[in-house]
Image: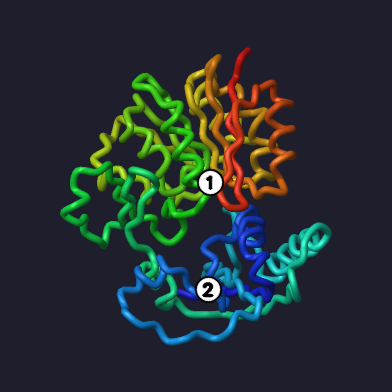
Amino acid sequence: MKWTKFRIKTITEAEDIIISTLYDIGLEGAQIEDKIPLTALEKEQMFVDILPDGPEDDGIAYLSFFVEQKEDGSLEVNGMSTDRDAVETQIRQELEELRFYMEIGEGSIIVSETEDIDWINNWKQYFHQFYIDDLLVIPSWEKVKEEDRNKKILHIDPGTAFGTGMHETTQLCIRQIKKYLTPETELLDVGTGSGILAILALMYGAKHAVGTDLDPCAVEAVAQNMEANGIAEEAFRMMIGNIITDKEVQEQVGYECYDIVVANILADVLVPLTPVIVHQMKKGGIYITSGIIDMKEQTVREAVEAAGLEILEVTYQGEWVSVTARKNG
């Protein structure tokens, strides 16, 4: 199997926003190379007593995105067939737009070809069990410690394309779901990915969940994580499709059915999603959004209010924002 690699030279301060921006156009699973020193927690998770001194942080970062090639050499991005020149052009356009309001450094792009190598699974060595408040999140390849056996435990195997729960945006959503959840909650998770949010809601007592995603790989990831956490097949319905533009998906998901809708997606997707998804919510339903970089907070606030929703609270973690609102009408 061959892959096309797009390697971007940028600065460390721009890593998150570039990754988020390019995720929106279908580039996932960024490989990050920088010289930022490891935190104490990261050092602990590497299971060594003494680490060699690394090079001094120079503020430079390289972000690599891998896109699988088809037999004819074309690339598939966001479910559409394209070529490397078109993808490179789109990346350049996105980077130039970012330059208008932030520093991104050089922003150069190197395009190359690589074989199916260990990078697909190498990331697993860096993902270890961790806590989100009273919740233990643990990957499928690790064992639960004896002292943690009585805790609430989420077993997760994110695969190569989906989140682990470590990101601030996911944690913001989890806290809000726990706050508004009841035993009668019908939950819709838009952009469900590995199913973390919906599965967690069911573990905390939600009645039923539905998840949507654009990526067909999400079906297998969700099924594996449901099995790992003992979630009954009938408790979580999964479907593939674009709920923003596809009327059939909207009808299958159902109108005025949900007590909670959660969308951990980028701000630029939340803006067109919000006026659509409001029709899936029950009166009094709660809308939990995240994936919002702090500079986009006002954009999402305006979209939420324009859809007729009442903003209940805005929460923050790092440079990320979650907006929670209610449908009153």
Q: Is residue 102 above or below residue 279?
A: below
Within-10-Å neighbours for mark 2: few <14, some 14–19, many 20+? some
* Relative to 218, 323 lies left or right: right
Report the label total. 2
Q: Is residue 195 above or below residue 44?
A: above
Is disc 2 placed on a helix, strand or loop?
A: strand
CA distance for labels 2 and 1: 21 Å
Looking at the figure, which quarter contains the C terminus? top right
Numbered circle sitting on residue 46: none
Within-10-Å neighbours for mark 1: few <14, some 14–19, many 20+? some
Q: Residue at x 60, y 19 (%)?
A: 327
The residue carrying mark 1 is: 214
* Relative to 84, 283 lies left or right: left
Three-letter residue code for mark 1: Leu
Looking at the figure, which quarter contains the N terminus? bottom left
The residue carrying mark 2 is: 3
Locate residue 94, reporting x and y percent.
Answer: 74, 60
Is disc 1 placed on a helix, strand or loop?
A: loop
Closest to the observer: 110 or 328?
328
- For the view shown, which residue lies furthest in the right direction? 100
Three-letter residue code for mark 2: Trp
Tell which circle, 2 or 1, labels the residue nearer the N-terminal end: 2
* Relative to 303, 96 lies left or right: right
State the image quarter where residue 13 is shown: bottom right
Q: Is residue 68 above or below residue 145?
A: below
Locate residue 157, reporting x and y percent.
Answer: 34, 55
Q: Is residue 16 above or below residue 258?
A: below
Q: Residue at x 41, y 26 (%)?
A: 181
Q: Residue at x 55, y 66 (%)?
A: 30
Locate residue 72, reporting x and y percent.
Answer: 57, 71
Are the two marked residues, 2 and 1, in contact with CB atoms closer than 8 angstroms?
no
